[in-house]
Amino acid sequence: MAEGYCVKCKAKREMQDSSEIVMKNNRRALKGTCPVCGTGMFKILGKA
């Protein structure tokens, strides 16, 4: 599982139900939810 920053909890947490997406500028990103508060989490990945 991927680790991301939850803005609501203000802490790094493991993303729940994360999936890889491609943004409009053709960059990869992970989108998931915080396991504690349920807020949406987002992490931009490197090029490739």
Image: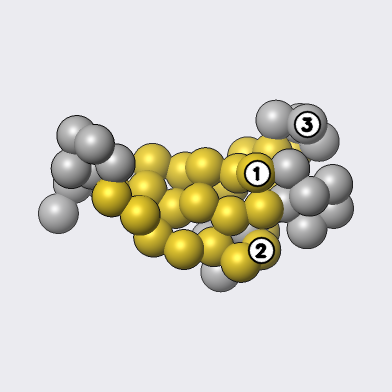
Check the picture and name the quadrant holding the C terminus.
bottom left
Q: Residue at x 54, y 62 (%)?
A: 18
**Three-letter code, disc 1:** Gly
Q: In this rendering, does residue 35 appear at all?
A: yes
Amino acid on which disc 2 is placed = Gln
Find the residue positioned furthest to the right.
Answer: 36
Q: Nearer the viewer, mark 1 or mark 3?
A: 1
Image position, residue 47 (x, y; %): 18, 46
* Dot 2 and dot 1 residues touching (CB under 8 Å): no
Q: CA distance from mark 1 to mark 3?
A: 9 Å
Which disc is residue 40 wearing?
Answer: 1
Q: Earlier in the sequence, mark 1 or mark 3?
A: 3
Type of amino acid at the residue the image marks with label 3: Lys
Point out residue 31 in the picture as x, y percentages from the top left corner: 50, 51
Residue 43 location (% of width, % of height):
47, 43
Instruction: Write down the residue under mark 2.
Output: 16
In the picture, measured across the screen, residue 48 lies left or right of residue 28, that is left
Q: Is residue 18 left or right of residue 12?
A: left
The residue wearing badge 3 is 8
Q: Quadrant of residue 17?
A: bottom right
